[in-house]
Image (spheres, helix red, strand yellow):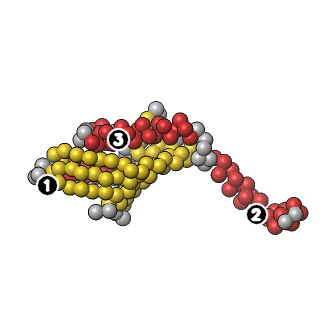
Amino acid sequence: MTFETFRYVFFPFRPAVLCALLFLTACNPNHGSPRVEDEVRQAFDNLTQASRTLNHDRFLAHFEPEGFSIVINGETRFDFDEFSEFYLTQSTQIERIDTLNFDLVHITVLNPNSAILLNHYTQTLQLKSGEMIEASGSGTQIWVRRGDNWKIIHVGSHSEN
């Protein structure tokens, strides 16, 4: 294709092409990637440590209530207070978490203030009733920078068992 042919074919679409290029440039996943990826990974590690130790306040502090959404096995919720209450009610039934492992954690930096984290987990825990629970699944989290902190604004989770 010659430049003249290219110009003739794409000239009518020039505004759309320019907008697409600007969008792709603005969302360059490599923009600040190593620093942002490290920061999000550290925030995720802090979240998982809070979960392992059943530190509920520290766990919930990793979430951004404003604009929060969660999808668990296809059910969507937008109310952080509802999520928080559900989490606290469920977690009071847990005696201890024996294992919480992530065999996959992948972070995609969208821009200096947001990232997507994908994970796959396996977990073993004991309920206060003595029952042992084994669980595994995958998750998607959207992290946003709020001041000097990284917060989760969206969670998608799917249990395998």
Q: Which residue is mark 3?
A: 47
Image quarter hosting the N terminus: bottom right
Instruction: Tell me if mark 2 has few (under 14), some (14-19) or many (20+) residues whose alpha carbon lies within 10 angstroms of its own.
Output: few
Q: Which residue is mark 2?
A: 13
| Front tag of 3 and 1 | 1
Q: Amino acid at mark 3?
A: Leu
User: Where in the figure is residue 130, as x and y percent of width and height?
Assistant: 11, 52
Q: Amino acid at mark 2?
A: Phe
Instruction: Tell me if mark 1 has few (under 14), some (14-19) or many (20+) residues whose alpha carbon lies within 10 angstroms of its own.
Output: few
Q: Is residue 132 left or right of residue 21?
A: left
Q: Please indicate, yes or no, whether residue 136 appears anywhere in the rendered image.
A: yes
The residue closer to the viewer here, 131 or 11, is: 131
Label at residue 11: none
| Residue at horizontal 33 percent and vertical 42 percent from the top | 48
Instruction: Tell me if mark 3 has few (under 14), some (14-19) or many (20+) residues whose alpha carbon lies within 10 angstroms of its own.
Output: many
| Residue at horizontal 42 percent and vertical 51 percent from the top | 104
Name which of mark 3 and mark 2 comes first in the sequence.
Answer: 2
Q: Amino acid at mark 1?
A: Glu
Q: Are marks 3 and 1 in contact (CB under 8 Å)?
A: no
Q: Is residue 125 left or right of residue 151?
A: left
User: Where in the figure is residue 154, as x and y percent of width and height?
Assistant: 41, 51
Q: Secondary structure at mark 1?
A: loop
Q: Secondary structure at mark 2?
A: helix
Label at residue 131: 1
Q: Secondary structure at mark 3?
A: helix
**On screen, residue 9 above or below 122:** below
User: Where in the figure is residue 101, as x and y percent of width and height?
Assistant: 33, 48
